[in-house]
Image (cartoon, rainbow, N blue to C red):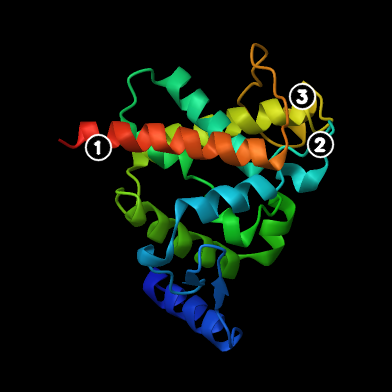
Amino acid sequence: MKVSSESSSSTVAKRLADHAPRTWQRMLSGRRLNLLDPSPLDIEIEDIALGLARNTRWNGQTQGAHAWSVAQHSDFVVDIVRRLNPKAPADVLMAAKLHDASEYVTHDLITPLKVVVGDVFAEVEERLLQAIRLRFGLAASLSENVQALIKSADKIAAATEAVQLAGFSEQEVRSVLGFREKPLHDFKLVPVPVADAEKAFLEGFRQIEAAMILQNR
């Protein structure tokens, strides 16, 4: 017997509620973010920037004196989106900027661990992402075309990180990680201190935010 997606979603929601007596986290901004039922009103970009700058890609297993943060990865994905589509509008760039923003509270689980954790984690991430998008002027869900563009940029970024920072060969990018996308060779990745990653993330956000305001006039 097939289970409808609505029924499956309800089951996941019940599992979340049953296993989490306290589902909120206090943020440094003073906001109290409910992780299972996040409100856009409790989301601040400063909290996101801090969390992503302190979160590491590849479980921290990267070369260099500093970790390669989710904040730097997010900025890298925006750069790649601009390469793939030089005419990408500001709202698409904002979606790319925030594509991993839920990780400011969920952290960046590596793919093998995500597979083990399963649907519950995916549900929490999706709820957070929808609230984050609404908070910053985007639709809760992205169109298929925008999703595909950002996913392609994300994989190119991951392939480049894998080769330059995480010790994978280009062959392993295909055979182990399963990426068809090729790493970039004309972009040197340089991990920076947390404070620098946080500042750059915020500055990039403000630029895209200003462009969105102009776009929507």
Residue sitting at 35 percent across and 56 percent down? 135
Residue sitting at 35 percent across and 41 percent down? 144
Please tell me whether mark 3 sits on a helix, a strand or a loop.
Answer: helix
Give the left or right position of residue 6, taking residue 184 as reference.
left
Give how far across and how far down residue 149 sits, in percent: 43, 32
Locate residue 115: give its quadrant.
bottom right
Choose the circle earlier in sequence order: 2 or 3: 2
Kindly identify the amino acid type of the residue bearing the numbered disc 2: Thr
Q: Give the distance between the C-alpha atoms of the residues marked 2 and 1, in whole angstroms.
A: 37 Å
Mark identifier at residue 213: 1
- Which residue was labeled with disc 3? 164
Give how far across and how far down residue 61 sits, in percent: 83, 42
Most extreme residue toward the top is 186
Q: Is residue 3 visible?
A: no
- Which residue was labeled with disc 2? 62
| Residue 151 or residue 192, whichever sits in front | 192
Give how far across and how far down residue 18 sits, in percent: 56, 88
Image marks 3 and 1: residues in contact by CB distance under 8 Å: no
Choose the circle earlier in sequence order: 3 or 1: 3
24 shown above or below 197: below
Foreground: disc 2 or disc 1: 1
Kindly identify the amino acid type of the residue bearing the numbered disc 1: Ile
The quarter of the image holding the C terminus is top left
Residue sitting at 79 percent across and 36 percent down? 66
